[in-house]
Image (cartoon, grey):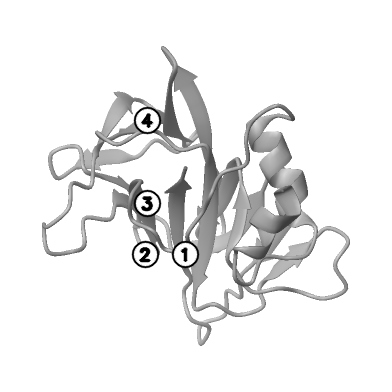
């Protein structure tokens, strides 16, 4: 069943689904039925370059509840009325072959799934890492962000987290290096935006 689940992800690297989904659910959990781009879930987290911004996607028109960030200092969780995520899906834009999958012969395009996403961002002289992972509190799952030593500013009624003094996203690691995405950082290279979907 895990391999069948993996086939439902367009662009998912061969073999990655089994490893990451098993790690996210444990061996005794039932496999999820996943429909690509199904919105019956918590909203995806949109990560924009520039002054790095994390925001629950509300459709940009205010038609959906994008949820809020609760926390302080460097650690925040995404709170939304829908049931919490069991695993995460990462998409990159532009969607080029930026990502190397352990054991694969050549880079792949997104999307990829896993239970932990570490995003390295910063300037040409200094880098920081923010980690998105799934936590459980009182039997409820949440997506949690940990910004380490570069805490964000909470904006727009707790709906956006912004990290100042950041030029761009440089790289992403999924499940501690099962997938590693390195994005070009030259002046003429496009900045990469990310979408982290909270999948059931």
Q: Label 4: few (<14), some or many (≥20) within 10 Å?
A: many
**Between discs 4 and 2, the one toward the N terminus:** 2
Q: Secondary structure at mark 1?
A: strand
**Between discs 2 and 1, the one toward the N terminus:** 2
**Between discs 1 and 3, the one toward the N terminus:** 3
Disc 2, disc 1: CB below 8 Å? yes
**Between discs 1 and 4, the one toward the N terminus:** 4
Q: Please give the residue where the numbered disc 3 appears in the rendered image.
A: 45
* Left or right position of 16 against 198: right
- Residue depth check, mark 4 versus mark 3: number of the one nearer the observer: 3
Q: Please give the residue where the numbered disc 4 appears in the rendered image.
A: 76
Residue lying furthest bottom in this view?
188
CA distance separating discs 2 and 1:
5 Å
> Which is more toward the observer, 38 or 76?
38
Disc 4, disc 2: CB below 8 Å? no
- Relative to 73, residue 98 above or below: below
CA distance separating discs 4 and 2:
20 Å
Percent x, y for residue 1? 72, 48
> Which is more toward the observer, 192 or 30?
30
Q: Secondary structure at mark 3?
A: strand
Count of residue discs: 4
* Residue 64 at least partly seen: yes
Q: Secondary structure at mark 4?
A: strand
Q: Label 2: few (<14), some or many (≥20) within 10 Å?
A: many
Q: Please give the residue where the numbered disc 1 appears in the rendered image.
A: 168
Percent x, y for residue 7? 67, 64
Q: Secondary structure at mark 2?
A: loop
Q: Please give the residue where the numbered disc 2 appears in the rendered image.
A: 50
Disc 1, disc 4: CB below 8 Å? no
Disc 3, disc 2: CB below 8 Å? no
- Relative to 136, residue 61 above or below: below
């Amino acid at each position: 069943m895990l391999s069948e689940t993996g086939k439902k992800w367009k662009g998912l690297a061969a073999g990655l689904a089994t490893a990451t989904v098993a790690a996210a659910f444990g061996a005794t959990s039932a496999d999820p039925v996943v429909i690509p781009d199904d919105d019956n879930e918590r909203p995806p987290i949109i990560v924009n370059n520039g002054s790095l911004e994390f925001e629950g996607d509300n459709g940009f028109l205010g038609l959906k509840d994008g949820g809020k960030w609760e926390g302080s200092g460097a650690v925040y969780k995404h709170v939304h009325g829908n049931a919490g995520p069991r695993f995460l899906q990462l998409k990159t834009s532009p969607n080029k072959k930026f990502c190397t999958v352990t054991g694969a012969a050549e880079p792949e395009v997104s999307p990829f799934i896993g239970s932990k996403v570490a995003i390295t961002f910063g300037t040409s002289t200094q880098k920081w890492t923010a980690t998105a992972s799934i936590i459980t509190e009182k039997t409820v799952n949440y997506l949690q962000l940990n910004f380490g030593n570069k805490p964000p500013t909470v904006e727009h009624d707790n709906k956006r987290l912004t990290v100042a003094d950041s030029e761009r996203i440089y790289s992403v690691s999924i499940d501690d290096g099962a997938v590693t995405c390195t994005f070009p950082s030259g002046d003429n290279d496009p900045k990469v935006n990310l979408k982290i979907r909270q999948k059931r």
